[in-house]
């Protein structure tokens, strides 16, 4: 029996960390992250400052396609495979140069050795095997610091904590059996041969495909599972808002009206998207194409809203084959228009309106970057649709005669189809920029 180690098609997405590594090198070229204490006994590395500079520099998404992705991957893209080792060596060389600049008279290896203590020096006097350092006695060479968890941060007393979402998908075997049955019917009715041996070969091939976890048959099964789960997660966000509305105890009547209106508009988006034929909602901007039906089939598309439940992390997944059920458990938290971690620190609403606004610094910078232009243009088109449907209104909240209940009567669809959609489907880029500039007017 021979063991074989080979690369296989595991269907994981490819990643490219080239943009992050380039930004890392660019930041490190101008900033020394190291600091050595005067007594040469402590080396400090300011990782947070470097990480912040990289995170706010506009790096590319590491994944080429994040649709339905639920796990990390180490599959490098072919172009990045070749450049990765060289970039790592450049970063290593840059870090060595910075550290040597602080130690002009010392060897790095010798300096690091002086910072550490041999494990044997911590051996206690007790006559027993193993590590027996007398921790109860103070040592001048060791320092300790207590780790403290802050419990007075905003939201610590919130009632919306430790919520979880459980999604149970039933009849998970039906799709598989129906797909198999359909393929068998196709072989029987449309296979262009009269040879029984050819029929038998085709049936055997189908059975082999079903057993092979990497086959196209099982890839299709996994794709359907991911797409179905994405739709269920998006629906769960709206159901959670409905749960809060039904159980909330608040005297804030205005807030309750706005919550009702948010739920109504999110339902309106679903109805509108599902009522359109394929291709009717295909729009264009800056050379990029977005199909709203595809975009709004994803669970994360609503996360750009300032107030929305966020499904964060998989807490568990189990399958009961006897019952034909798969159960997914997710963490759930509520997003309340907090500050976005950008250099300007805007809240979520202002940040996303800035993305739509063609006069904003970020909009112009991203569209001017050939590597990021297409991704950013799709982001603009997505937020334009989402923010119009959720926030467009004929009412003026600052008016003396403002009636909040009138928000519940406004239907954004007619004006969207009359004024917005035709422009986004056209090739007139100047008209689109003018449209985006006026988005605040609703």
Image (tube, helix red, strand yellow):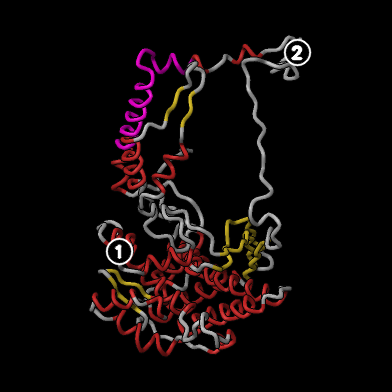
Residue 231 position in % (x across, y down): 53, 72
* Residue 274 makes an appearance in the image: no
Q: Earlier in the sequence, mark 2 or mark 1?
A: 2
With 367 as the anchor, is 189 left or right in this view? right
The total number of labels drawn is: 2
As drawn, is 390 to the left or to the right of 427?
A: right
Q: Nearer the viewer, residue 19 or 211?
A: 19
Foreground: disc 2 or disc 1? 1
How many other residues sit within 10 Å of disc 2, few (<14), some (14-19) or many (≥20)?
few
User: In the image, 272: left or right of 289?
Assistant: right
Residue 4 on the magenta span: no
Q: In the drawing, what numbered circle is on residue 215? A: none
**Would you say the magenta stretch is mainly helix, strand or loop?**
helix
Q: Which residues are magenta?
A: 86-113
The relative height of residue 90 versus residue 73 in the rendered view (above or below) is above
Q: Residue furthest front?
A: 400
Residue receiving disc 1: 374
Q: Secondary structure at mark 2?
A: loop
Quadrant of the rendering where the C terminus is positioned: bottom left
The mark found on residue 128 in the picture is: 2
Secondary element at image label 1? helix
- Above or below, 175 relative to 145: below
Give the x, y percent position of residue 185: 46, 79
Looking at the picture, tell me which residue is in the foreground, 4 or 163: 163
Give the left or right position of residue 337, taking residue 163 as reference: left
In percent of width and height, residue 416 lies at 40, 85
Q: Residue at x 57, y 74 (%)?
A: 235
* Residue 334, image quadrant: bottom right
Residues at marks 2 and 1, CA–CA distance in whole angstroms: 66 Å
On screen, 421 above or below 99?
Answer: below
């Amino acid at each position: 029996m021979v063991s074989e180690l080979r690369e296989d098609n595991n269907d994981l997405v490819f990643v490219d960390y080239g943009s992050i590594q380039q930004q890392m090198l660019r930041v490190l070229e101008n900033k020394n992250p190291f600091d050595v204490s005067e007594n040469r006994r402590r080396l400090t590395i300011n990782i947070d400052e470097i990480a912040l500079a990289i995170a706010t520099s506009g790096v590319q998404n590491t994944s080429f396609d994040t649709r339905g992705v639920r796990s990390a991957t180490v599959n490098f893209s072919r172009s990045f495979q070749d450049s990765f080792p060289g970039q790592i060596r450049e970063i290593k060389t840059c870090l060595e140069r910075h550290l040597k600049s602080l130690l002009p008279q010392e060897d790095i290896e010798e300096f690091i050795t002086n910072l550490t203590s041999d494990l044997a020096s911590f051996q206690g006097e007790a006559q027993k095997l193993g590590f027996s350092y007398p921790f109860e006695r103070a040592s001048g060479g060791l320092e300790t610091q207590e780790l403290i968890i802050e419990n007075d941060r905003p939201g610590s007393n919130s009632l919306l904590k430790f919520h979880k979402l459980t999604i149970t998908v039933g009849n998970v075997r039906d799709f598989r059996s129906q797909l198999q049955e359909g393929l068998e019917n196709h072989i029987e009715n449309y296979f262009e041969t009269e040879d029984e041996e050819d029929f038998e070969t085709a049936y055997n091939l189908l059975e082999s495909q079903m057993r092979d976890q990497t086959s196209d048959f099982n890839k299709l099964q996994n794709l359907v599972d991911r797409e179905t789960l994405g739709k269920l997660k998006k629906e769960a966000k709206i159901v959670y808002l409905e749960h809060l509305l039904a159980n909330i105890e608040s005297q804030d009547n205005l807030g309750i009206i706005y919550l009702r209106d948010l739920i109504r508009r999110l339902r309106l988006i679903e109805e509108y998207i599902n009522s359109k034929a394929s291709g009717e909602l295909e729009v264009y901007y800056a050379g990029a194409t977005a199909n709203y039906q595809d975009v709004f089939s994803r669970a994360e598309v609503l996360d750009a809203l300032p107030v929305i439940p966020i499904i964060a992390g998989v807490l568990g997944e189990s399958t009961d084959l006897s019952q034909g059920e798969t159960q997914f458990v997710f963490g759930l938290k509520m997003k309340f228009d907090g500050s976005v971690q950008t250099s300007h620190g805007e809240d979520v609403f202002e940040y996303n309106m800035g993305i739509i606004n063609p006069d904003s610094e970020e909009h112009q910078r991203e569209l001017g970057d050939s590597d990021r232009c297409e991704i950013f243009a799709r982001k603009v088109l997505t937020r334009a649709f989402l923010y119009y449907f959720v926030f467009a209104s004929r009412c003026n909240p600052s008016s003396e005669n403002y009636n909040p209940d009138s928000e519940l009567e406004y239907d954004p669809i007619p004006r969207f189809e009359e004024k917005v959609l035709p422009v986004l489907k056209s090739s007139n880029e100047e008209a689109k920029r003018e449209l985006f500039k006026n988005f605040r007017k609703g």
